[in-house]
Structures are given as structure tokens and as C-alpha cells.
Image: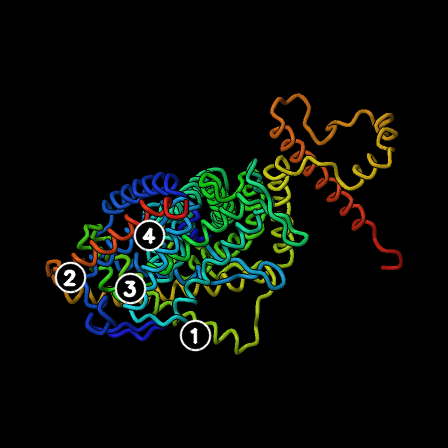
Amino acid sequence: MHLHGPHPEPVSPAEYPGVLGRLDARAKIVALVGFVVVVVTTPADAFAAFALYGLVLSFLVGLAHMPLRLLGRRLLLIMPFVVVVAVFLPFFHRHGAGSLSVGPVTMDVGGLLILFNVTVKALLAVTATSVLLHTTGISSLLAGLERLRVPRVFVLMVSFLHRYSFVVGEEFRRMRTAMDSRNYRARWLWQGGVLGRMVGALFVRSYERAERVHLAMVSRGYCGAAPPTAGLPLSLWDGAFMAAVLLLAVSIRVAGPYVGA
Amino acid sequence: MHIPDGFIDAPTAVATGVAAAGVVAYSLRRTGRDMHERSVPLLGVTAAFVFAAQMLNFPVAGGTSGHLIGALLAMVLLGPWAGVLVMTAVLVVQALVMADGGITALGANLLNMAVAGGLLPFAVFALLRRILARNVTGFLAAVAVSSWCAVVLASAAAALELAASGTVPPSVALPTMVAVHMIIGLGEALITTTVVAAVLASRPDLVKTFPSNLKPPATAPALGRRGRALTFTGAALILALALAVFVSPFASSSPDGLERVAEEKGFAEAALEEPVWAGSPLPEYVFPGIANDRVATALAGLVGTLVLFALVFLLGRAVRGRPAPGSQ
């Protein structure tokens, strides 16, 4: 099956760029998710640690041949949350932390540290997951998750979600074009009912399409089992990559708080 | 609504992660009982639909918009446990593919959207269906109210998690988040109800929680002039009551502008010495005879809003009831 979606995927793993593209999905999942977990547990004032994490990640971004514009677009996603925390800044009053005035705005140093903490951690984590996805692709990622003992039904469901999201998305785009070409635009809450009926029609349309596909699959002998994924053992390179990333992360985490002090 | 990595600290992430894993494991067992691996593709397409619907921004006012959560919609369509799985799949794909919502915050996001914004309001839905009339209108009314609850509860859960992580101050974050989402919730309720009504009109068998002995509507119900007015009034009343009960206790206790000026200019005492109406039933917006300050303020807000609504309603009837001069 070939999908024409917004993000068409390379068919074979060999088409993924760089050295990282050739590694086993499991190794990359363990290494990069482990990296994110270590980053999240780092105390907020270990500034040197965050700089070093950034250095490790920028090396990985280079190895992954990742376009910086793509990375930038993903990093922008966390901005709404940064704004939410920034709005609450004037309300933080940690005794004795002191305050900082920039023009008419007085900010609390404790509050600023919290803002720095959440922003830098979110940026590092988004970069790490982007490297993971960019070098692996969703189908090998899911195969890797299944081999890491994530329940099979769940992995199957996620893979169907991913496939059908293109179908539903295109169906929706067609309905949207129809709406736009009739010069309709909902601006106020009470016009939401029109969107509601559109979404209802979208559900029935995509469901009926999936039903037809499902019946066709069952009549060809589908009984819930996906074709077995290639069961190669982890190579030496996979192990080396995992060990290198995790060891670097843990040693930065342990040494970080002492470097700045 | 999708909390990124870093906004949830390690202890909160572990606690929410363990709780969420438990809920997902239980849902897997429950759905496994009456569902084969064969029907997984059909769950998958519903998940894809929720995934797409979450990208749909609906208008709130002017240019601002909110987006659907869709957990309650999935649960009404598929039943609660399959709904949890659908939301989990959606959140996993969003975290991995779109970098929307963090990996360490997955448990927290799942608790917000599948439990606080899914299972809890589904319980409200089940309760309402026992109370309300057993016909299509009653069913849709239960969908509307519980999907509004879903948004409010999900936002409250998100605020509590962020507060537990020390990211935002709880006393400010909770009322702010809840107040904003009370308005966004109206959009969710409107859209969820029309979606369910539209699906009922063409494929009632796809709405799993719809009792098979009921007659589904022949066409997607459209509200007439009177229906729209009733819906608008009802929504406004619910919103006002909810604001009064949930938000007023957390409002600033500082004096308002007039009181402040009065204190500064020294005429505050003049007012205090001789209140115009000494027998006010709710002095200083606090319900008498209740020890807890916040509960007392909430009750006072509830009663005050209801009385005000009744007064305005009666006034409106009275004004409209009088025929305009020269109209006949």
C-alpha cells in the first residue's frame, strides 16, 4: 500500500538519512526516550548541564541530517505553553529569591527560573523526539515498540490510526474545499453547529470507507495478525549508540550541578 | 491542552504515568473481552477521526478559537473503555509524530484527556441518562452537558498537575484555566452534540451507547428560532452559575475600585454606618451560617445568580407582554 499523505514515508529503512537511519529502532527509542527522562529530572539551576545536553543533541541533529526549518517548526509548538507560564510569572512570590525589574514590569527571580526550566527542558525533549522520528519513521518506530513488548493490539491500533489519518484528513480537506467554495466561514460560537454537522458527516464517511476496507481484508483472510516484523538481533553499533547516549546523559546529569557552582 | 516535556516534574510524571498505565491496562482487558483483534481497524479509524477532529478549530468569538478534545465523543460512539484506548493512541501519535505533548508528560495528558475529560464526564453522561427523559432529546442533552463537563474537568486536571509540579501557582492557575475553559466547553458541547445527532440520523448503529429500542431521528435535528433562543439562554445560565460557584471563591479579596477610592477619600465609614438595607440576606456576598469561607461565597454566588436570572427573566416577560402602542 502506498500512502499519498502530507508526510510520505520512505519505503525501506535504508532510505532514512545518515548513520542514525541505519540503526535499529529499539536502540534509538531506548536511547532518546532515556535521554528525555534524564533531562526532565535535572534540577533547574544546573545551567551547565543544559548547555551540555544541547551540545549532545546538536551533534545528533547533525548526524540525522535534519533540516533546521523542520526542527524550528516543531519547536514552535511549545510556545503556547511557555506563554501560559510566562503569564503567571508575576504571581510567583518565593520569599528571599529577590526580584528583577525590566521597565515597568517587575518579575520574580524564582518565577524566571521556573520559566527557564520548563522552556529549556521542553525544547531539548522536542529536539530529541524529532531526531527519533526523523531517522526512524513511524512504521519502524511501531515495529520497534512492538518488539519492546508494548501490547500488540495497541501497536496495531496506532498503526491503523496513522494510516487512516491520511484518509480522514483528505476527506476533511475535500469537505473544507466545498465549504470554502460556497463562501462560508464560521466566525461565532453559534455557527459551530454547521461545523458539527460537517464533522458528523466526516465520521460517517470515513467509517463507511474503513468498513469496506475491513470487509475486504477479512474476506482475504485477515484475522488480526500483522505480518511479522523482521526479527534481527541488535547489532554492536546499536548497543554502542545506546550506551554512548545514555552514559553521556547520565554523566552530564550527575556532574552538571557541580560544574556551575 | 497538550502539556510538553519539562512542564511536569519527575514525581508528578511518575505518579500520573503509573495511574495512566493502570487505566490503559484495565481498558485493554475490558475491550479485549468483547472485541477481537479483527475489529482493531475500526477502532483505528475512529482514532484517526478524533485525531483529525482535534485539529479542527471551532470559533469562540471573533477571531479566537478552541479545539475539540473528543474523548467524550469517542466514548459515546464506542463505549468508555474503547474510548480510553482511542485517546491513548491519539496521544501517543501526537507525542511521537507531531511533537505535540511530551513523552514524560504522556501520563499526565492521558489522565487529563481520557480520565478527567473522558471517564469522569462519561459517568456524568450515564447518570444524566437515568435522570433525563428516555428519548433522543434526553440523550442529546446528556451528551451536551457531559461534554461541557469534560472540557472543564480536563482543564482543572491540567491546572492541578502543573500546580503539583510547581510550574504555576495553584490559587491563580485553577480559577483562570477553569474560567477560560467554561467558555471553550460551550463550543465542545455544541459540536459534540451536533456530531452525535448527525451520526444518529444516518447510522444510529455506530453510536454504541444509543439504546437500540429508541427511534433515531429521521434527519439531523436543526434548531429553530425558539430552540436557538432556549439553547442560548440555557448555556448562558449554566455558564453564569458555574462561574459563580467555581470561580467566585477564588476571586481577589481586595476592595473593588469604588471601595478603594472610598477608603482613600475617607467616606467608606459614611457608607458603613448606615446601610440602606440592613436586612440583606447575603451580606458581603457570603452565605450566612456556613463555616467554610469558600463554600459560603460559592453558595452566595449560586443564589445571587439564580435570583438575578429570575428577575431579568420576569422583567423581560413583563416588557414583552405589553403591546407596543399603536401596534394594533
Marks 2 & 1 on one chain: yes
- Read off the residue under disc 1: A174
Nearer mark to the viewer, of 1 and 4? 4
Q: Residues within 10 Å of mark 2 (few under 14, many from 20)?
A: few
| Residue B209 visible in image | no
Mark 3: secondary structure: helix
Question: Residue at the location (71% across, 40% down)?
Answer: B310
Q: Residues within 10 Å of mark 4 (few under 14, many from 20)?
A: many
Question: Residue at the location (36% across, 66% down)?
Answer: A206
- Read off the residue under disc 2: A237
Numbered tag placed on residue A40 in the rendering: none
Q: Which amino acid, by three-letter code, is at mark 1?
A: Arg
Q: Which amino acid, by three-letter code, is at mark 2?
A: Trp
- Read off the residue under disc 4: A36
Marks 4 & 2 on one chain: yes
Mark 1: secondary structure: helix
Q: Chain of mark 4?
A: A
Mark 4: secondary structure: helix
Q: Which amino acid, by three-letter code, is at mark 3?
A: Glu
**Left or right: A46 in relation to B152:** left
Numbered tag placed on residue A211 in the rendering: 3
Furthest residue in direction bottom, as rendered: A181
Upstream in sequence: badge 1 or badge 3 = 1
> How far, Cα to Cα, is label 1 from label 3?
20 Å
